[in-house]
Image: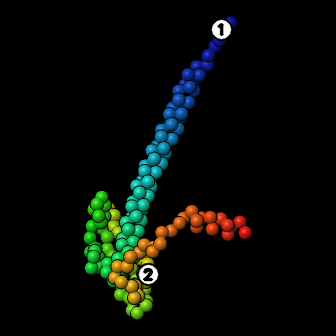
Amino acid sequence: MVVRRRPGGRGFTLVEVIISGVILVICAGVLLTLTSQALSMHRRGEEKVVAAALLDELLGRVLTEGAEDFGLIYSNQGPCDAPFQNWEYSVDIDNAVGIDPFKVNVVVTSPIGNPYECATLVAPRLGEDPNPVRSPEEPVDREERWAEINEMMEGF
């Protein structure tokens, strides 16, 4: 038995290969675009995490040292501590009147110039020593406290 081929049979296979090649190139282009967007989003996410940590550290210093004394101990602006010395910070503390809280605004700026800002209120220290001891007078027995909490929860 002899199999006859049509004259256009080979051309149809070549068209299929060309179409599948074009589809493959389009898919590769989409994959590269998605990968570059994912890397860009990852870099922005890392930058935001570092900014949040630096903001938290600076606000923690203001709270620990007191809004009144922060400017005496630390500079209100400049480069952050190592290993983030390429980041800049600025701390603005508005004076409190009487028992009103201090308005604290902290801005950190990334190496590429993106600013991140956080504002909060800090209560003034009234009648306390400038730097009071902030540790408990008696050691805390955590196991006993946990047992008390469990006993209270069993009643509910």
Classify residue 78 by image quadrant: bottom left
Q: Quadrant of the N terminus?
A: top right
Q: Percent position (x, y) of residue 106? A: 37, 74
Q: How far apart are the two marked residues, 2 and 1, measured between alpha carbons?
A: 93 Å
Q: How packed is label 2: few (under 14 Cα within 10 Å), some, or many (20 or more)?
A: some
Give the residue pinned by disc 2: 121
Q: Is residue 105 visible?
A: no
84 vs 7, left or right, is: left
Secondary structure type for disc 2: strand
> Would you place residue 82 above or below residue 36 in this image?
below
Q: Secondary structure at mark 1?
A: loop
Residue most extreme to the front? 138
Residue 114 vs residue 24, the one in the foreground: 114
Q: Residues within 10 Å of mark 1 (few under 14, many from 20)?
A: few
Identified at 44% across, 58% down, the residue is 45
Residue shown at 31% from the left, 61% from the top? 84
Question: Residue 142: percent from the left, percent from the top?
Answer: 54, 64
Quarter of the picture holding the C terminus: bottom right
Q: Which residue is mark 1?
A: 2
Hey, what amino acid is under mark 2? Answer: Leu
Mark sitting earlier along the chain (2/1) = 1
Depth order, front residue of 8/44 = 44
Are the residues at dot 2 and dot 1 in contact (C-beta closer than 8 Å)?
no
Indicate the position of residue 138 as horizontal and vertical percent values: 47, 72
Q: Label 1 is placed on what type of residue?
A: Val
Is residue 100 depicted above or below 10 in this figure? below
* Residue 153 visible in the current orientation: yes
